[in-house]
Amino acid sequence: MAVAQGGGLDPASLLAPLENSWPTYSGDYSGRRYSKLTQVNIDNVQQLTLAWTRTLDSGMPALEGANAPDFTGGEGEGDFTIGSQRIKGSILQVGDLLYVTAPDHVWALDVRDGGERWHYFWKTRGGPHIGNRGAALWRDSLIFETVDNYLVSLDAKTGEERWHTEIASFEEQYFSTMAPIVVGDHLLVGTGNDLDAPGFLQSFDPETGELQWRFYTVPMSEDDPGIDTWPSLDAAMHGGGQVWVPGSYDPETNYYIFGTGNPTPGYTGVARRGDNLFTCTLIAVDVDTGEMAWYFQTSPHDTHDWDSAQTPILIDGVVDGVPRKLVSTAARNGYFFTVDRVTGAHVVTARYGATSNWASHIRESGSPNPHPAKEALIPGALVSPVEGGVANWQPPAFNPDTGLFYTQENNGFNLLYLTDPDPRGSMGLGGKDRVTVGSGGNALSAIDYRTGDTTWRHAWPSGGGGGAGVLTTAGGLVFTGDGSGNFVAFDAANGDLLWNTRIGNISNAPQTYLIDERQHVLVAAGQQLFAFVQY
């Protein structure tokens, strides 16, 4: 891993294929979560054993005394009580340090034993503390988002704050959970909001925190593209499309490719008739300008809160005998998509959610067409998938050795009722009620990116849906977690279960790194970290 003068992370080094570190959200820019490490492989994974474990208290800390954080910042008064939060984000690893985040907290830990090097605490103004998805490294700075919409830069060695800047309006009830992504001298960040506010992606100067550009995901003027897919400019400007999960970067085109969230109002679509671009859409923007290069909408006129925010995966593949530069995503709506990442041209649409029933047909564009009978209705509608989707924010993975895309598949049905027939719609996610009918079976699925066909599928035990992200390696392995507290490893080629251990429900995606010539596999379950190694 290349480093800048002074020992910091050189942003140019992120362009190289992932070797033995984990310096950014997906390990590298491709979104693949694929490691070239082979020390742990299909022949010896059964020998994995626990190297160390550490519990991190992510609740409200004592601000004075021996156990106080090393550094405290924030715009709050320190009187907002927070409960313990699960570790959901990617854990960055460079050299002998791990960087772990939870809402309002950042820790630097020793990579060998999990010992604490420093702890930073942010005094929040409040907001929904639903998670933090990680940090970004830029030279010798560590940068993260706060729930109350600040971007904070710390000295990566000491934890001391360098600067913070506001990135969205707390008063308009935006909240921020995304892991920033560094591309050269750009720091890309997004935010969340469920109360009828426009979504946007922003680029900041990682040295100073100054805004470089902002890209709105919905039309903000009558001249903006996509305005013809909304009934009015007012509807579009309150139309949602939040950017709350990191995307992927293609250095050949200089495109940052990311997904957007659902339109708002979320369930009562009568006030926003039309396809509602660019919500539930895969978008490519030029990193230097923020201008949109292409788009592909995965859920036109979504009325189920099925964000398409999942991290897309860049694939250099072959389709019909022709080499292609591709990007694939397994959307929350139960459909798998592959498009050309240079042009956005459609290549594949395939249903991977076994029970998904909301689409009437596939349009010529490749987008599924929503069936009106599957929207929220006063007498109720039987709809699949459930609100959480077939897949949610948990990262998928892709292994170039097998050509397979690995994702959780959670199937189920809701009875969806319309409770507010007002033609003006309901604010945010209101205006509906739902009853979960039951599970349709949950699994880890391995999908052929060229066709969308499922090559193998491991069904989880009854009632044990998978909520973990995925890691795959050149050792022929796939690591993830089930819903019964098991951390598991599969043969990446055929799905054979090779190893498992019960540690509690996995709350992030597994990662791997090499230190002292030993490959470690790292994962979080709630507030606890587990590192595995072979002895």
Image: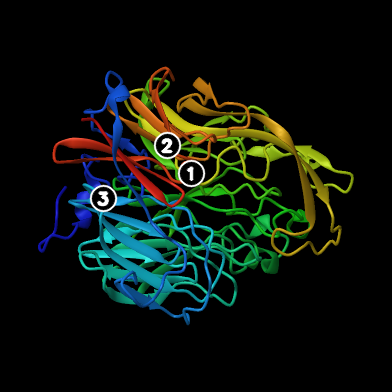
Callout 1 secondary element: loop
Give the Cα separation between the discs numbered 1 and 2: 8 Å
Does residue 117 appear to the left or right of 149 in the view shown?
left
- At 29% from the left edge and 29% from the top edge, which residue is drawn? 48
Name the quadrant containing residue 438: top right
- 70 over 521 or under it: above or below: below
**Disc 3 target residue:** 93
Amino acid at pointer 1: Gln
Does residue 3 appear to the left or right of 328 in the view shown?
left
Give the Cα separation between the discs numbered 1 and 3: 19 Å
Amino acid at pointer 2: Val
Q: Is residue 70 visible?
A: yes
Give the Cα separation between the discs numbered 2 and 3: 17 Å
- At 23% from the left edge and 45% from the top edge, which residue is drawn? 21
**Disc 2 target residue:** 470
Give yes or no for contact between labels 1 and 2 (Cβ–Cβ under 8 Å): yes
Query: Residue 348 appears at what percent x and percent y?
Result: 52, 30
**Disc 1 target residue:** 394
> Which one is nearer the viewer's eye here, 281 or 379?
379
